[in-house]
Image (tube, rainbow, N blue to C red):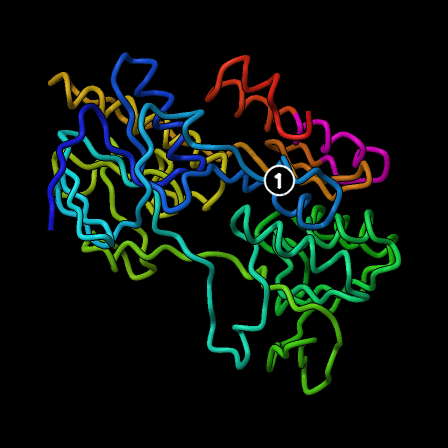
Amino acid sequence: MTSRAVDGVLIVGGGYAGVHTARSVRRAGRSASVVDPTGRHDFVTRLAAVAGGTAPTSDAAAPLSDFADDVIIGSMTAVRDGEVDLSDGTTLTADAVVITAGAVPITPPIDGIEHAYPLRTEADALELRAEIETCDAVVIVGGGATGVQLAGAIAAAQPRTAVTIVDVSDRLLAGMGKASGRDAARILCERGVSIRLGSEVDEILEHGVLIDGEATDGLPVWAGGFAARADQFGLPANDEGRLLVDRFLRVEGWTKTFAAGDIALHLTEDGDELPMSAQIAVQAGDAAGRNAVRTLRGDALDRADLGHRGWVLDLGGNRGLAEVGPVALTAPFLDLLPPTLHWGIDMKHLIETRGLAGFNDRPGA
């Protein structure tokens, strides 16, 4: 086992929380080193469009070297305050650490789950895209944001492909408002997507899904969401595996280590649990990065002020859904606006993390 000291702030994970942590650190004049298994930043909010065929493959990811001073290829296996163990036996040490990795796709005890294609990374999106381009039917298990966006993109780009979306809930987008679920169903039905709600998946087959005892043929895709696994890395976690942090996003009981993104249990000022989403990851990454730099300087930490501002989904074919505060842009004609909002949010992410060069080299440009 070898030990390596890292200057500046050590960031584990190159997702939205990780690159926004790096942005905060670098803007403060400190070095940001990112540990990641692939060395790529996946544009998670664009993966469904890439896999479905409504966005170019270049929308899927960008090299982490565009966002950080140093990129360390590796996977985290354990964490202690100020120390991170990697799978190759290396221990990285730093005076300030931010953990942003540790959420994985939910894998329920369904027979044949290994046959389903996931959608979490650039590699997943590109593999799925290639398979969809050559198949006649797709069955998507999961009616949340990923499943709905993927179904919409496939139906828009491949209208001859039969698409079925399955969910155990009684409506699509159960985590959003009823109007969003209703109008998501309207848009998908207009494109010929078959929607099966309140249905249990008994088994996932190599070329289909067994639903309530009935086989539905098609390429099986798992879009059932993600879960945190902080407890597997020696981190304090709740019963759902989400890492416990204080009001400064510092790991509870520790002094050098912070956390942001899906792995962490983020709360509002009123103590309400915030969703695992890119927008929360962005806010938390910014706050964690600022406090990591304050730790290096010996300055007082600032309380993180996080809040959920709404949802914006792009369903391809110039249609989408949005909930911004009390306003829902889901009805006919209003559903033309969310794709533009979605594009604007993606561009904001690129410009904030990579500067104007990120806009010029933006995915799809």
119 or 87: which is nearer to us?
Answer: 87
Q: Is residue 215 visible?
A: yes
Residue to which mark 1 is pinned: 46
In x, y percent, where is residue 123?
Answer: 54, 50
User: Three-letter amino acid code at disc 1?
Assistant: Arg
For the record, the magenta segment spans: 329-343
Residue 246 lies in quadrant: top left
Whether residue 336 appears in magenta in the rendering, the answer is yes
In x, y percent, where is residue 66?
Answer: 45, 25
182 or 133: which is nearer to us?
Answer: 133
Left or right? Give the position of 109 relative to 102.
Answer: right
Residue at image location 87% in from the left, 59% down from the top: 192
Residue at image location 68% in from the left, 79% down from the top: 211
313 or 197: which is nearer to us?
Answer: 313
Residue extending furthest toward the bottom: 213
Residue at image location 33% in from the left, 45% down from the top: 264
Whether residue 358 appears in magenta in the rendering, the answer is no
In x, y percent, where is residue 18?
Answer: 37, 34
Query: SS at mark 1?
Result: helix
Tell me: residue 353, above or below residue 269: above
